[in-house]
Amino acid sequence: MPREVISMLMMKERRPAFRTIDGWARCVLLGAGAIRECEEHGCMKDSADPHAFERALLIALEDPPPGVSPEEAVAAIENVLGWIGDACPECSAESG
Ligand SMILES: [Zn+2]
């Protein structure tokens, strides 16, 4: 294997699996059912399910992304959920 290819692979390995911890948190929230995708617009909305939110927090505590502490993972989950409203912003714009 040429040396340039090897160094490229090594650079790739140093990157985290997820580009940002926010992206990871959104995946966890979606997987747990704490947020849902609007069928029409594809934006995220809070599913207002406290059990789903608890599940997402448990995942963050037990299985944080590589190089991230459980505390940071939980903070990211709470942070991402804080941005997401109960309704899709595009749906509310249409009805309002
Ligand atoms: Zn929508």
Image (tube, rainbow, N blue to C red):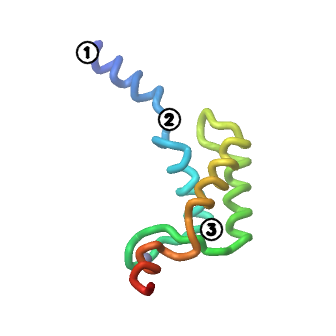
User: Which residue is identified by label 2?
Assistant: 16
Residue for point 38% across, 79% down = 40
Secondary structure at numbered mark 3: loop
Q: Which amino acid does label 2 sit on?
A: Pro
Q: Residues within 10 Å of mark 3 (few under 14, many from 20)?
A: many
Q: How far apart are marks 2 and 3 (CA)?
A: 24 Å
Secondary structure at numbered mark 2: loop
Residue for point 61% across, 74% down = 47
Tag on residue 2? 1
Pinpoint residue 91: horizontal percent, then vertical percent.
Answer: 43, 80
User: Which residue is identified by label 3?
Assistant: 34
Q: Distance between the residues labelled 2 and 1?
A: 24 Å
Residue for point 47% across, 26% down = 14
Mark earlier in primary sequence (2, 1) = 1
Secondary structure at numbered mark 1: loop
Q: Seen in the image, is 4 located left or right of residue 81?
A: left
Q: Which amino acid does label 3 sit on?
A: Ala
Task: Say whether mark 1 is within 8 Å of ligand 1.
Answer: no
Pinpoint residue 59: horizontal percent, then vertical percent.
Answer: 68, 53
Residue nearest the observer in this picture, 76 or 67:
76
In which of the image's four quarters is ligand 1 placed? Answer: bottom left
User: Marks 3 and 1: which is nearer the front?
Assistant: 3
Residue for point 41% across, 75% down = 90
Q: Seen in the image, is 71 located left or right of residue 76?
A: right
Image quadrant in which you'd find residue 78: bottom right
Q: How crowded is mark 1: few (under 14 residues within 10 Å), some or many (20 or more)?
A: few
Task: Say whether mark 3 is within 8 Å of ligand 1.
Answer: no
Q: Distance between the residues labelled 3 and 1?
A: 46 Å
Q: How crowded is mark 2: few (under 14 residues within 10 Å), some or many (20 or more)?
A: few
Residue nearest the observer in this picture, 74 or 89:
89
